[in-house]
Image (cartoon, rainbow, N blue to C red):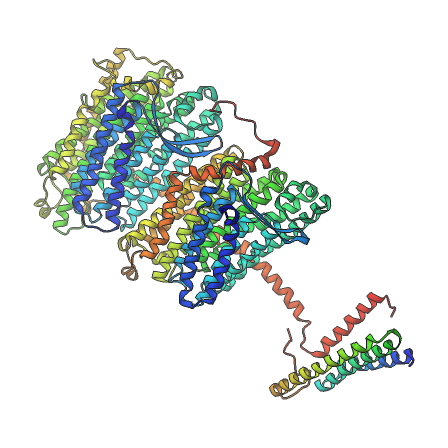
Amino acid sequence: MNYEAWVLEALLAFPLVTAIAVLLRPVREAKWIALFATLIEFLISVPLWWEFDPTVALMQFQVARPWIAGWGVWFRLGLDGISLFMVLLTTFTMPLAVLSSFNYIREKERAYYALLLVLTTGMLGVFLALDLFVFYMFWELMLIPMYFLIGVWGGPRRLYAAIKFFLFTFVGSLLMLVAILTIYYYVGRATGTYSFDYYHLLSNIQVTDRWAFWLFGAFFLAFAIKVPLFPFHTWLPDAHVEAPTAGSVILAGILLKMGCYGFLRFALPFYPNVVLDPMVATVVVVLAVIGIIYGGLVAMVQPDFKKLVAYSSVAHLGFVMLGIWAATVQSLEGAIIIMISHGISTGALFFLAGMLYERRHTREIAAFGGLAKVVPLLAAVLTIVVLSSVGLPGTNGFIGEFLVLIGSFGIYPWAVVVAATGVVVAAMYMLRALQRIIYNKLDNPENEGMLDLSRRELAVLLPLIALIFWIGVYPAPFLRRIEASTSMLVEQVRGAQAPAPFETGGRR
Amino acid sequence: MPATVGWVWLVLLFPLAGFLANGAISVLRLDAKRAVTTIGVGALVLSFLVAVAVMAGLAGAPADAPYVLSLWQWMPAGRLEIELALQVDQLSAMMLLVVTGVSMVIHVFSVGYMGEDPGYARYFSYLNLFVFFMLVLVLGANFPVMFVGWEGVGLCSYLLIGFWFENEAFANAGKKAFIMNRIGDVGFLLAMFMIFQAVGTLSFIEVFEYAPRAFAIGGTAITLITLALFVGAIGKSAQIPLYTWLPDAMAGPTPVSALIHAATMVTAGVYMVARANVLFAMAPISSFTVAAVGAITALFAATVALKQWDIKKVLAYSTVSQLGYMFMGVGVGAYAAGIFHLTTHAFFKALLFLGAGSVIHALHHAYHHTHSSEEAQDMRNMGGLRKWMPLTATFMWIATLAIVGVPGFSGFFSKDEILAATFARGHEAAAFYVLWAVGVVTALLTAFYMTRLMIYTFHGPNRSGEKEQQHLHESPWVMTGPLLVLAVLAIVGGLINLPAVLPGSGWLHHWLEPVTELSAAYLPEVHLSHSTEWVLLGFATLVAALGIIGAWRLLKPAALKPAREAPEETGIQKVLLNKWYVDEIYDTLIVRPIMWVSENVLWKVIDKGIIDGFGANGSANLARAMGWLGSRLQTGYLGTYVFLFVLGALILLRVVTGWEL
Amino acid sequence: MLLGPSLGLSAVLFSLGVAGVLFRRNAIVIFICIELMLNAVNLSFIAFAQQLGRSGQVIVFFVMAVAAAEAAVGLAIMIAIYRHKDTIDVREINLLRG
């Protein structure tokens, strides 16, 4: 059978099967099974890079099987330029997450690795689903493993964090369920075909226009909490701080992107008029910009390194939201690039925070200092990752921010002016932390005997660093694959309102 | 494209490879000092040779349009198309030569200066990386690629200022430099956004070609764009109000100060304005702002330099001041003059810094031998050093005469050209005469503080200490050799662009014409008669002489006490010594309030208090309160439950059957 | 058999049972009262079965079976409670109080 026919289903099924295998085999094999499972999963997904046709804007690799046919629920999957990199990011992150847990997780290993694998399926399902029922199912499915990852293997305040995480997300997703059912019902009544099919609902969405604002609001809340958009962000620092390293990495790297992905896949194409409504747009853009500055300023005063990174996520995701709402080709491509590169850079930062924690059993920035002297390799890696997070040109961070800002400038010039100062704030908090961790005097004797990165840790970090530079120096292959789908999305959203073509000069 | 011009990517490749190799050696803690030296210096030598070849290729095949070497597509997104492309034209080739040449000399010097530092490999890897980014900045064929270099040099500056990171103040200085640079970078970014919005492309050739059609002369758009670009230049080139990082940057090793904070990186702003000369020429308001900020900075920094005791701080403020001159030059439309001064300044200021480095090196060794903790950079601890360090003293005198503007030395010609260009525009508006006057006063102050530096360092009695004097000696040839090369350049550097009144004049001016002619249409025709020019030259000479003689007469090095015995300064002297308290003002008005608000308002009140306390935990508490209310029904007595059950059943019966009670 | 009197008796028995459950304290007595209510229902099933067919009688067997099972479980619970608290007075048993 050819690759495109089975790949998506295989991606979803394989982790579930191996999760069972993890549970059945002896404890000492658990981590190895999980590692190989996630590696194979990654290898399965890699050919998507070549098989994906960058000229096609619509869904590729489509699959459709009846599931609860009576309700119009079909198992519909597909992949386009927007979801492609989310899928690859997920399959790429998971082996690293497993590998980084080898020393950190000492108890209930089988359950831990099984949950990680179930989580993989859940996350991939969200990105692949083309049926709103299936989408919602996966959306909730990934919530449960994450809840346990935080609640069982987390830090001292893990229960508070886990429940907070769960409730925040759940409130939003319940409203989303109501919205999905409403759309399903009215579209079904109007067309006579009751179906959760994404394209069926999308092409008949106008029958719900009377309630567009409220339906959009329900989606908005679900996704905005997940992003998280200021002021729905307070679950994030708690969840990040308490979660085990791999949990934080997955949370930052992938889960946050689901909110952004939801906006791109559902909220924008469904209700472009609400999105572009001046009132709504102003509110969202202002919140996004507040998130950029506010997240950065709050990050600056955090004594806890993980919390600092968590607040920096709020700032980065503010850029994504700005890019999504500007809805130009550049800003959307930039938003997707930030989604990818935030997964890489922030993921790497959490890995490093975990490695520091394993060495010193503290996350307090003040407990470190002068590490560049004892662990030069770790210091070098941390520097590179911090610079990528700061958005230094030549690293991945710059590409996304630049595209978002240049794409949004024509639409929201003032928001861009304020957002651009976010790069200064980013430098302030990140360099402050960097200095207090690896520079200054080595004044804590406990840091003197610190070990440099082990081979296993290098194996976790080097792929991330390679990607940091790849996307920074040669992002064109990524952008080419994203372009067709985002251009189509821009047309969907802007429709007739597309800005007049450029006239004063330029090549085209 | 001539073949040698096509090699230009090699100029970038060597320093990058050097960075990677030395970086690996440093991180893996290999003991390979000889290899580090070979790689670090070798990369620069190769790079310089290629640069010479590129220059020769360009000179041999002059073309009107710049050569663009496109490496690969960088950021294609919709109608935005950005390529990683290098541009070779007369301006970038000139800069290429200056950057690689001066860098090479300073690399050689560093071999001696940093020889005993444990971070030797790290040092050379950073230095190579810096050269790489500086060349990217110079060679970029569009604004984003230039920006890569622009931020990249800022990064290297950060890494090198904080090179001795164990000292918290040094690490802070690095961070400060990076952040202040970034404030400027926001301006650069916004300028790019506006240019793209207006012109639809970011490549230099296209932007400059379309600009006349896209913008109205002196219009809002072009004015905003150029002002934003200039904000970027202010940050990078340490002009008011973003100059305070540069004096702090002296925390880095002295060759770094010579290379980054005198000869190359800080002049990037000037280079950028010259590069975008069309845009600036189309925006007279911006251009005047450039010139005015430059003039004010020049004067202001010169006043601070008058009273500094740290030899490097004097030079740092002197650099800020000289950068002000360059901005004055490019601001009045004398782009070639700005680049000319940039070039000569690179020679004599690098020489001054390296000379200072040589002095510090010697003093540091002396104090090291006697286990003294005296400050090796404080001029109050120097004096009379020419006895021990004749070569260094000679070379530094040459540089001093150059910067002061003594006729025949390079600085004389370049400074004069800027002042003449400013003066020439005086007939348009009297404001230009004011700028010229500011420039002349600055020249006077420059002559004074530079002479002061020389007197206190090399003349008069020695204040280093009895024991230390025995350990003072001239630096090795690996350090004096580079000084010699730079000294020669500082003398003859002026030859590349002699003023119009002298024979064989204006080579650089003609050479840069293909780049600057774009803007010529928007600038008023300036012409000075030969007699006026002679008068100006004579006046400049007079001012320089006045400054030098004034310093000789007024300063009494014999009365100076070593740093530890020095009395507290008072009055205006104290204000100058403390640099007009600008750092303190910034700290009180900007830095502390931001930190305080972030911690106490944003985090503790809004985040933890309102959103979390009121919103999240508030709703949790509300749910708990409702639960408590409900739990009051749960008496635990069977009777209550049964009673409620029966009651409920009866009500249900009533509702379902409609049965009347 | 007359339907009216049967249903009347059933209603009386049921009401007695409800009153017993409501007002008695001894768990055994409450238990017996529950049985009383069940049997009152059984009685009305049988009465209706006379007129509506035999399926009502089948239900009665189900009820008796359930009642037997309930008696077994209920008594077991009560023994457990007695062992634990030395009483089966329902006022003393209020672990569920909120």
* Observer-nearest of A327 and B621: A327
The relative height of residue A421 versus residue A237 in the rendered view (above or below) is above
Residue B335 pos. (x, y %)? 32, 22
Residue A223 pos. (x, y %)? 56, 49
Whether residue C18 sits left or right of residue B524 in the image: it is right
Query: Residue at left 42%, top 45%?
Result: A426
Query: Residue at left 63%, top 42%?
Result: A202
Residue B441 pos. (x, y %)? 28, 26
Whether residue B367 sits left or right of residue A249 in the image: it is left
The picture quadrant where one finds residue B462 is: top left
* Observer-nearest of B552 and B201: B201
Whether residue A492 sits left or right of residue B210 in the image: it is right
Residue B576 pos. (x, y %)? 29, 37
- The answer to whether any part of residue B350 appears in the image is yes
The relative height of residue B431 versus residue B576 in the rendered view (above or below) is above
- The answer to whether any part of residue B252 appears in the image is no
The relative height of residue C44 versus residue A141 in the rendered view (above or below) is below
Query: Residue at left 31%, top 56%?
Result: A455
Q: How many circles with numbers are drawn on the protein? A: 0
